[in-house]
Amino acid sequence: MRALVYSDKLHLQTDFATPIAQPHQALIKISKAGICNTDLELTHGYMGFQGVLGHEFVGVVVQGDQHLLNKRVVGEINVAEGDCDMCRRGIPSQCRYRTTVGIFQHQGAFADYLALTTDNLFVVPDNVSDTEAVFVEPLAAACQILEAVHISPRDKVVVVGAGKLGLLCAQVLRLTGADVCVVVRREKPLKMLKKWGLRAVSRADLQDNQADIVVDCTGTAEGFADGLTLVKPRGTIVLKSTYTDIPSANLTKVVIDEVRVIGSRCGPFDAALRLLEAKLVDVNSMVDAHYPFNEAMQAFDKAFLPGALKVIIDF
Ligand SMILES: [Zn+2]
């Protein structure tokens, strides 16, 4: 089968062995997959991953449980072993022995086929398109903020970083009724936020120490520093992106102002599917380009361009 493989460099392979589904797995024929910033970081050596990249996907089950056969599915990317203390506490996403699709010790979705644990699969509702379904994984990650922080409709929430994840977070957070604004630097997200009726601001528009909650989607030291100056005493900063290096930060402010700093990663797929099914979130506007799989290398070049939004690979 065809597969986009990272081993010291990214390359398209046409003779990659097709995975064989184990008894607890389904074999999925991939229809579409999205390029995430994590994929870009992986090609710079993040996690030391070598193998088939890709973790935002939709496909059709061609082999596996009868109730899933021929169904369109998306897949939760953390594969838990099921028996460690975290699994037993009902937190499989933090399984101590987990593998992660296309990120850690598990083949990814930039390939014609993917074998994945049946328990990880969710059937896509008919009124959710393949393109929309590609966004389920990052949209679920945006929903995870609500799992970690209680957001009141009285809260002022600032999203820092108007990239792909930031735009999804802003759309999810506005559903709480809170006063949400997004710190924007580029023209493209600015237009999109206006279209959605969401408030876009520049950093200079915002006063320090006023936000109840800051969501940092930048993954940069600068973004975290902005979050620290924007958050009010006893406020919360939610970190949604991994950091490429270890940011230095004014932790004294965290102490004196009793700021809570919360990390947040993968989230509930069923919730993300409900939001898409009910058309409560617009992901279609966030697609920058579609590329056929044979042009996956060009798709990566496009995704690397500054300010690029979602690049989708069509199989
Ligand atoms: Zn476990």
Image (tube, rainbow, N blue to C red):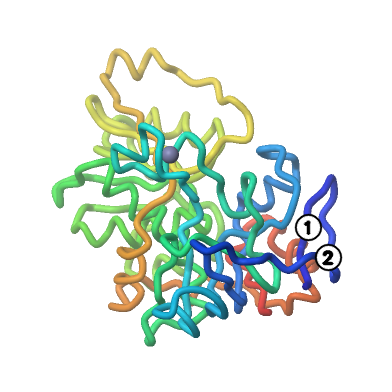
Quadrant in which residue 208 is drawn: top left
Amino acid at circle 2: Leu
Does 13 sit left or right of 201 as displayed? right
Q: CA distance from mark 2 to mark 1?
A: 6 Å
Res. 206 image quadrant: top left
Contact between marks 2 and 1 (CB within 8 A): the answer is yes
Q: Residue at x 74, y 40 (%)?
A: 45
Residue linked to disc 1 = 5
Crowding at dot 2, Cα within 10 Å, few <14 / some 14-19 / many 20+, comes out as some
User: In the image, what residue type sits under mark 1?
Assistant: Val
Circle 2 residue: 12
Q: Quadrant of residue 47?
A: top right
The answer to whether 209 appears left or right of 65 in the picture is: left
Q: Which residue is located at x 82 percent, y 55 percent?
A: 10
The answer to whether 219 is drawn above or below residue 107 in the figure is: above
Give the quadrant of the C terminus: bottom right
